Image: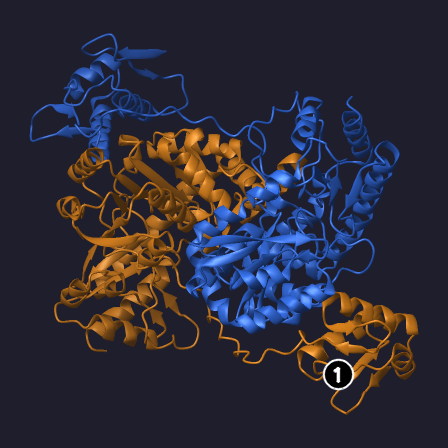
Chain colours: A blue, B orange
Amino acid sequence: MSIEWTGSGPELPLRVDRNRPEPLREQLESALRESIRAGRLAAGERLPSSRVLARDLGVSRGLVTECYAQLQAEGYLVTRGGSATRVAAAARPPVDAPSPPSMPAGPAVLPETPEIPGLPALAGSVGIDFRPGVPDLSSFPRERWSRALRRACRDVPSDLLGYGDPYGDPVLRDVLAAYLRRVRGAAADAAHTVVCAGYAQGLQLVLRALAGEGVRVVAVEDPGDPDHRAAAATAGLDIIAVPVDEHGVDTGVLAATGARAVLLTPAHQSPTGVVLAPGRRQALIAWAVARDATIVEDDYDAEFRYDREPVGALQGLAPDRVALLGSVSKSLAPALRLGWILCPPRLSAEIARQKRLADRGSPVLDQFALADLVRSGHYDRHLRHMRTRYAARRAALVDALGRYAPEVEVRGLAAGFHAVARLPPGTDERAVVEAARRRSVALYGISGYLLDPPERRTSSARLVLGFGNLTPDSISDGIATVADLLRGG
Amino acid sequence: MSIEWTGSGPELPLRVDRNRPEPLREQLESALRESIRAGRLAAGERLPSSRVLARDLGVSRGLVTECYAQLQAEGYLVTRGGSATRVAAAARPPVDAPSPPSMPAGPAVLPETPEIPGLPALAGSVGIDFRPGVPDLSSFPRERWSRALRRACRDVPSDLLGYGDPYGDPVLRDVLAAYLRRVRGAAADAAHTVVCAGYAQGLQLVLRALAGEGVRVVAVEDPGDPDHRAAAATAGLDIIAVPVDEHGVDTGVLAATGARAVLLTPAHQSPTGVVLAPGRRQALIAWAVARDATIVEDDYDAEFRYDREPVGALQGLAPDRVALLGSVSKSLAPALRLGWILCPPRLSAEIARQKRLADRGSPVLDQFALADLVRSGHYDRHLRHMRTRYAARRAALVDALGRYAPEVEVRGLAAGFHAVARLPPGTDERAVVEAARRRSVALYGISGYLLDPPERRTSSARLVLGFGNLTPDSISDGIATVADLLRGG
């Protein structure tokens, strides 16, 4: 049963319905708010007395009085002295309400994968997506993580459910420091470890702490993450691009820039896949010491090395000059948003202060769960398992390129789960990417990673091929499609 | 069994131990790294040949060769041509390594509770802590939350385990928008809802978006959160303090400041506990419309109202002029770090962009769990349960004050779980706080919340009494102690 009051005109239906689960009072309040917001009840308009409205709707007068009082307290209605209840002047509908912007369709832009404007949408659903930086999402250890969370919910002391230590949970920091000493050769100290929400946040916190020290410009690798410019700008910094060659970032060019901070991916450069050479490592440390400069080391893809043991972090060489950023985004899943910073001791208090301002500290239960996973050895076992899995995918990529496109040169395969394929001279990178999308294969050209515009024009056509989240069969099919396109198919 | 190589002098013990679980190679690598970092092996120093070291340690020569190669790749050692392996120049110990700063003892500073410098430490463990802004941590629904997380781990589609939508999970945004329409009278639209890591992050994102619109100054309530100045500074903004009286923020003073943004806690002012009066609500909206200004509404304590239904959010009156910030910190637990922003439509894309730069989006499993909890009705039931619980604690506070300290006037009890007690004229607020700490009762004076220095000097002594995380018995005991101190005990 639904009852309406149409008031002074037919355009004001105040409806209550006894068959709906919400209490009548709530229904009437909502209906009044909506009518006022939509302008159906205009500012200054007089409402019927509570007696009349109650009678018309078949509800108690007390209910209407309460509704009026509630909406008066909220600022929708005004009642002065004994006079009638009216719609408040403040409660007018927005005059120029813009229409909602369309939401981003599908997954958002990824850190390492710029959206290239003007690309055609993928035909139908994404068939085979070579998006770099995405690990094998189907291998996320759901059951293990769920169990670790269950234990965290059960065991966390109540007093840790408040606002936590902005540095992060002390137990997790101990566990992470021990892990990073053991696995990454880092000079890790729990007192200078800050837990954060993944790499993106870690970068923000470090850049802000550097800005607080007077740093104004941060050098970045070119090609590199196109988000770096916006990330630096948010911290009040400019970036300067330094070219990457086959040994990693060009330390000579870096020294000539005069920058006092540099952001690097030494373990597996993003996107070229180059591993920073030993001589460059030493040159970097010498530069940092001589210039009183700071190296921000993105320990990108470090866990996955195929030809040898993972190379230890640069941070171990000079813990007072390097901030090491790591996360579980590649080892477990990006969706967890958990990472860490090994801070140069002089910066750790400021980085923790920035973390506190940013979000008061990372979620406590997730921190408990990660500590549990690492301490129990499941994290190591999962990484070993994944290394085998990625090695098989890497082999499938090498195999498919050899079989279908032997003319394509591939680089950056020593570590991680992306590589760079250099297309034959004269190939139009953008045309290949567009043609592939029409065949439901998502490719990512190097041009989206080039920061220096002249370089963007002269660079030869290259594809950044992420293979972490593709099965060997999909990799093979995708490369067959690329080869077909290169032959003009 | 442990074997040492003491090299050229007794200060270089390179030790491997077959009884330890780590592989010998890992042990030797770690020992070399540590010796270099600690300066026990100096830059340029020549290492023994792999043959000699292998013999001395009783390990295979291949193992030593691999270790040397690994540390060369990492930059600790150099080998040029056929010459000896030496310690790299880069790998020197830090010259001026500052000693680690002492870590914050105990819980970090809370958003609403400034640490007042110079206060004596609590005698022994905290007996009774009247810290405002902390909900009843022992009531966190561990079992329900754990179950919701378990379902999230089981049900989340793999493709949502990557980098997510920076706006937040679409399902949670729908659920939150419906909840906020129903419970907070908000004009909520999932398209303009951004999920964030609690209030602190929400505030940062909104302030940055406002800074991007050219806002330079944000008005804040005085007394108010002393963190607001630092939070605004991080976004590149200044603050201007506007006094709060018994009707809430003084809208006349606000209008005179010329500010184009204001940050408010209308539902239960932090810290005075005042509820914004209906006339002030209308004046605020009129001001925002006339000045093209933005109101940032911290929906603080809104869920807990004792004398009436919760007053609907200001945002419902003018969704294009108000950004509403809410979180589960009071309703579930601060440790979850989950919140939301209802954005003015013109700002939502920029706020989501800032969220993406800040941390790429909130953790997905937590978002699934919260959507589950709200949709299933457990969230509402938990809030109803907590309202009863807090009402009993509030009653215990009123009762204890009436019994032990009838001369103390208490305000701000209409909502939430803190109130303000005005101490008798002539009382020295700081002296009372210090004396109470010596008796293991933590009190928080209003002076820590006063932004305007002259006000700080003339204001009468007041205590901000948080009672959310104290049992009725503790509240009663704590107030008895305060009363005793006021009588000079």
Q: Where, quadrant-wise, is the N terminus of chain B in this rendering?
A: bottom right
Measured along the vertical axis of the image, is residue A222 above or below residue B44? above
Q: What residue occupies the far top of the structure in this picture? A: A10
Q: Determine the secondary structure under disc 1.
A: loop
On the question of residue A296 being in view, the answer is no
Q: Which residue is mark 1?
A: B45
Locate residue A144 relative to residue A99 in the image: left or right.
right
Q: What residue occupies the far bottom of the structure in this picture? A: B10
Q: Residue at x 63, y 66 (%)?
A: A284
Judging depth in this view, the residue of A263 and B437 nearest the camera is A263
Q: Residue at x 22, y 12 (%)?
A: A56
Q: Where, quadrant-wise, is the C terminus of chain B in this rendering?
A: bottom left
Residue B47's x, y, as percent?
81, 81
Residue B450's x, y, as percent?
23, 61
Locate residue B133 relative to residue A14 in the image: left or right.
right
Q: Residue at x 24, y 75 (%)?
A: B431
Q: Residue at x 20, y 39 (%)?
A: B284
Residue A115's x, y, as percent?
58, 34
Judging depth in this view, the residue of B471 and B20 nearest the camera is B20
| Disc 1: host chain | B
Measured along the vertical axis of the image, is residue A399 above or below residue A24? below
Q: What residue occupies the far left of the structure in this picture? A: A82
